[in-house]
Image (cartoon, rainbow, N blue to C red):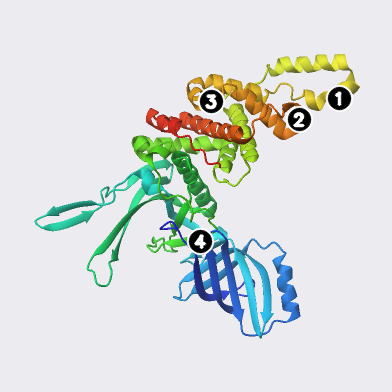
Amino acid sequence: MNRGVIANRDIEGRWWLLGKPDAVQYGILHFDPDEGLVLETKEARAQSEAEIFEGLTEAGNENDGGTIIGRDRHDQPVTLFFCARCGDESSAGLRVMRFHAGYALMGREVPSWQDVRLNSIRMDFTGLNSWLGFHPFNRKCEDGVAYVGYRYPDDFVFPVQEGVELRIVAEGSIRDGAKDDNSLTLSEKRLFELRWSAAADMKQVHQWTLLLQRFLSLAMGKPVYVRSLRGFMDDRDHQHISTPIVLLKKNSGAVTAEELVLPGETLFSFEDVKEHFGEIFNRWLEYTTRLDAVIDLYFAVVFNQSLYIDHRFLLLAQALERYHVVQIGGSRESPKEFDKRLREASSLLGEEHFTFFYEKLKWANEKTLFQRLNELLETRRGLSADVIHEFPDFAKVVKNTRNYSTHWDPSLEKKAAKGAHLVRLVDCMRLLLANLFLTDLGLPTTAMSHALKSRFVEYE
């Protein structure tokens, strides 16, 4: 299990349930990163058939906006959002109610999800310390006295947008040794911190977290997960609260994610981009907006390793096609010439036949997948040659495999990639997309060298 990941926990407390703010219940909030949040309350009384039926009925209704307020055993506030009743039971005079919750806000009572606004957040990502390459602590001895301090005592600060500041900050901890030992254990880790001049709502928090997660996943060449997220919120007097708010939610994959990132595995390291990190990340913000569909398709493959290889292939083929549309574009001929061609076809075919074929004809000016791939390889020849060298007929193989997988045309069965051949093809497609991203972002040649050497095949 990764150290630092917010792991399984049970939070005992008092809870004021949906629609019943005056009725307190006692119960336990169960949290599992892979399963999410479930609140279970128990009451020493029998439950009537009507109440059981009511619970079952509510379980089937949409109740995404439900908020439950609670206090843990230390009397600290807990707020649960997007709660829905998921079933009751009654036995031996004990009434049990269960609720699924989408999010838990530890440390603050907030009336609704729309009222959650944070001035800053700190995010710990899997593999981050390895990728940053920071050596923990700087040790020195003067006059017989040992001193320990951060090797990089100052934050790395990157203004990324007006009113938004991105930082790499350090956090250290000291832990006593064994009872019979006077030693201390020192540990240090680095986190990303985002600060907003105007408080950000949770939609903005999610968007920025996803941007960072995907950027780091591209850099490391493997899925990267948020290990923990803490936020800071101003109070009504606009005094900054030093106690962080911990956000709990379903976080599948974080517990089992690889923590060690070896230099040969990364597409680029922080050292490669340290001097221009702010500029490159700003380009990433603009880039993900312009190529949103391409980025979504690419990371659908990165973060869903359980997908069948055929599905991975189809997603990457669609991503490459869409990349061409956005970055290169163009049609087979000018719209003016194509309109003229349509009018001539209408005259030759007659209105009845033209109407029948129109749905097909109106798309005839769009370039085919084969044409788009060939143009893409031609315009990015210096990049693509090394990436797909084992597929000299790359465009044709992708086209035939896509058409066979989509239409199940028997004539293409022997021309489509299958088995280990398909695995290598998917690997090349994914690596090609990653390198296209790096080139567009203006990554230095050292980063490109890492990428070309990283043949990260993840399939059995």
Q: Amino acid at mark 2?
A: Asp
Q: Give the number of the mark in front: 4 or 3.
A: 3
- Answer with the quarter of the image where residue 328 lies: top right
**Residue found at x 56% / y 58%:** 114
Q: Residues within 10 Å of mark 4 (few under 14, many from 20)?
A: many
* Left or right: residue 264 compared with residue 397: left
Q: Are marks 2 and 1 in contact (CB under 8 Å)?
A: no
For the point 53% across and 65% down, the residue is: 31
Percent coordinates x, y for residue 238 in the rendering? 41, 60
For the residue labelled by badge 1, is the local secondary structure a helix, a strand or a loop?
helix
User: Which residue is denoted by mark 2 in the rendering?
Assistant: 409
Q: Earlier in the sequence, mark 4 or mark 3?
A: 4
Report the residue marked by disc 3. 390
Reading the image, the residue beneath label 1 is 355
Q: Residue at horizontal 72%, vertical 77%?
A: 51
Q: Amino acid at mark 1?
A: Thr
Front tag of 1 and 4:
4
Rendering coords of residue 18 (x, y %): 63, 71
Mark 4 and mark 3 in contact? Answer it, CB < 8 Å: no
Q: Nearer the viewer, mark 2 or mark 1?
A: 2
The residue tagged 4 is: 248
Foreground: disc 4 or disc 2: 2
- Determine the secondary structure under disc 3: loop
- Name the N-terminal-most of marks 3 and 1: 1
Q: Amino acid at mark 3?
A: Glu
Q: Residue at x 58, y 34 (%)?
A: 426
Q: CA distance from mark 4 to mark 3?
A: 45 Å
Question: Which of the two residues, 47 or 285, is positioned nearer the viewer here?
Answer: 47
Measure the C-alpha gap from mark 2 to mark 1. Answer: 27 Å
